[in-house]
Image: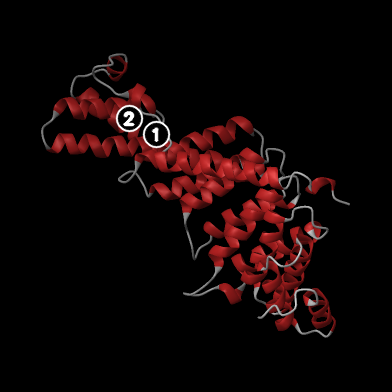
Amino acid sequence: MPLGDPTTAMARLHEAQEQGETKQVAGLGETIRKSTELTFEDRAEAAFLAAEAEVQREELGAAFDDYRWILENAPWSEHVDVIEDRLFTIGKTMLFGEEYAGWFDDRGRGVEVMETLAAHYRASDKADDALRLVGDYFASDDVRAWGEASLSYLRVADEFPDSEWAERCLWLAGHCRLNEALGPRYDRNELLRAEQLLKRSLKDHPHGVALIETKADLSTCREELAQAELVVADFYAGRNVLPGEIVRLTNAAALYPETEGGKQAAQRLLAMGLDPAVLAQDPTRNSIDTVHFVLPRWEREADEKRKSDTKAAGGKSAGMDTLP
């Protein structure tokens, strides 16, 4: 929409708002926001009025763009407190609303909305809820992006340890990693990551509400880890590579002795005339010390970028908590 006379732009914007012309408010407000002919205060006010109009028009993506512009460029705005509630409502609608489902949905923007809220309102009671809902979205039946869900849940546990959701989210982070692993024949690293998270959950919350689920998942995870060693042992056995078979059987028997896979491995070693306990003490005949989870490079880089972005956002919005 054309700006026209910049000296009358705000008056025209307010007049359109009073008349309920939401389309005109949204268009002119966006034009003013992008203009360099008005003061920054006017641009921030116009952005807010445009966003409010877009909400009424149910154009939530456009509203989010205006709200985010204010947070990133005018964190001193008197509307910051209102924007927090708006973002939470928009995020929930985009993530779970029926109108955003289907092949051409816009739910990915719902994730963006919630992560923006968490970055700019870290002291808010809604920040942990926002990240938990992102995890719930990724873990939902029609998405099942288990890796993304695990990362979102883990952020709640790590960044908001006092949250009412922290304990359950830590278990869910491990649970989703276990789902991501797809069993013992795929990526063992995912199983190791799941085991690490589930053990941490038991250690940090030994009497928590997710105790039963965590123990059950950990038992399943360790069984699958033992089976993963047997899968590789069978691979070596099928090619008559005895040293490789022995290493993997020893791993299963020594690391996961309580599992069915660990017991099977011990029996196979005994049938060969080998003592599993002796083999476990011989570093040349096992790889026990090298079986541990290593965070993938892409995940380390993503985590470092997220922390950097969060720090930058916190710096821009440092004055929010002191607003009246």
Residue at the image point whose x is 79% and y is 53% from the top: 76
Q: Is residue 179 visible?
A: yes
The location of residue 31, given as percent across then percent down, is 67, 73
Which label is found at residue 275?
none
Q: How many marks?
A: 2
Q: Circle 1 is placed at which residue position?
A: 259
**Vertical arrangement, residue 98 with respect to residue 202, above or below:** below
Residue at the image point whose x is 34% and y is 31% from the top: 262
Which residue is farthest left?
240
**187 vs 214, nearest the viewer:** 187
The amino acid on which the numbered mark 1 sits, given as a three-letter code, is: Thr
Instruction: Report whether 49 appears left or right of 256.
Output: right
Real-space Cα separation, disc 1 to disc 2, in angstroms? 9 Å
Instruction: Report whether 184 appears left or right of 312.
Output: left
**168 vs 42, nearest the viewer:** 42
Residue at the image point whose x is 68% and y is 72% from the top: 30
Whether the residues at callouts 1 and 2 have beta carbons within 8 Å, the answer is yes
**Vertical arrangement, residue 150 with respect to residue 40, above or below:** above
The amino acid on which the numbered mark 2 sits, given as a three-letter code, is: Ala
**148 vs 192, nearest the viewer:** 148
The location of residue 248, given as percent across then percent down, is 26, 29
Element at label 1: loop
The location of residue 28, given as percent across then percent down, is 71, 77
Q: Quadrant of residue 93?
A: bottom right
Q: Is residue 156 visible?
A: no
Which residue is farthest right?
324
Q: Circle 2 is placed at which residue position?
A: 252
Instruction: Report whether 189 appears left or right of 32.
Output: left
The location of residue 144, given as percent across then percent down, is 47, 59
Element at label 2: helix
Name the image quarter holding the N terminus.
bottom right
- The tag earlier along the polypeptide, 1 or 2, is 2
